[in-house]
Amino acid sequence: MIAFPKFEGLAPVIALLYPPACTICAVSIRSGEYLCDECEEKAARIVAPFCEKCSEPFEGAIVGPFSCANCAHRTMHFDAAVAACRSRGVVREILHAFKYSRQIYLRHLVARWLRLAMDDERLRGRHFDIIVPVPLHPARQRERGFNQASLLAELLSREISVPWRPLLERIRYATTQTALDRAERLENLHNAFRLRKNANVRDSSVLLIDDVLTTGSTLSECARVLKRAGAHSVYAATAARA
Ligand SMILES: [Zn+2]
Ligand SMILES: [Zn+2]
């Protein structure tokens, strides 16, 4: 259940009328928070061991870097994709409310998770020239009213003082990825993205942003386009991964 009001512009007024409540369970919380401590704790963080390339967690004891079977069998064009949380339970609920129910104020909470991903040792201390959000097809963006990746890129940009630019565009209107199997997803994504006119990423270190990593195919395709255009590295950060 989503308990917080939808209209962000009215938030100061509404906050006077209704004390702040947990987005998930509606108990009273401190102002400036989105979740109560109990719900916050249910957000499953990704902890080692995980695939050094795509951050797929591995259940069991592995010491040192390793690649998952998924990454061993195909080329992932990003240098590494880092996610803070598993896209399950509370996290999944928040991501869905943000993206599909237009609870746009939730970008602040999702951006906090994204910020946590930046603390991973593959990203921490690394220099980035530019933050690039994964684009939506213009028709999809019109339908949704916003691009969640752009909203997150904007917030992260302020936090880490790296400029963000929507340098990629999506030129193929893909059916929803979630309904497809892996082979279909790859076909669906082939040549789906291109660099915008006049965009220049030559010799740049790019940080690619999305809300969630599902199979990594979208991020990989975007990274492929950026690298073909001369980017010398492309790392990806997402708030969550499947
Ligand atoms: Zn709660
Ligand atoms: Zn992997």
Image (cartoon, rainbow, N blue to C red):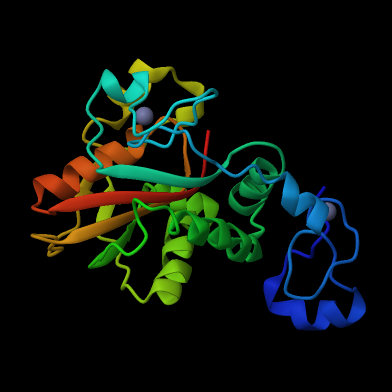
State which quadrant residue 14 falls in. bottom right
Residue 238 visible from this viewpoint? yes
Give x and y (percent) for residue 106.
64, 61
Number of labelled discs?
Answer: 0
Give x and y (percent) for residue 241.
50, 38
Residue 135 visible from this viewpoint? no
Give x and y (percent) for residue 101.
67, 50
- Residue lying at 31% horizontally and 43% vertically, measured from the top left: 80
| Between 216 and 200, the one nearer to me in the picture | 216
In the rendered view, tell whether residue 116 sits above or below residue 137.
below
| Between 146 and 229, the one nearer to me in the picture | 229
In the rendered view, tell whether residue 160 sits above or below residue 197.
below
Could you tell whether 227 is left or right of 38 in the image?
A: left
- Residue lying at 88% horizontally and 82% vertically, measured from the top left: 16
Could you tell whether 26 is left or right of 138 in the image?
A: right
| Between 144 and 202, the one nearer to me in the picture | 202
State which quadrant residue 35 falls in. bottom right
Could you tell whether 91 is left or right of 33 in the image?
A: left
- Residue lying at 34% horizontally and 16% vertically, measured from the top left: 183
Give x and y (percent) for residue 212.
49, 43
| Between 57 and 49, the one nearer to me in the picture | 49
| The furthest residue to the front | 63
Could you tell whether 173 is left or right of 114 in the image?
A: left
In the rendered view, tell whether residue 73 sits above or below residue 106.
above
- Residue lying at 45% horizontally and 31% vertically, measured from the top left: 56
Please tell me in which quarter of the rendered image ligand 2 is found. top left
State which quadrant residue 111 falls in. bottom right
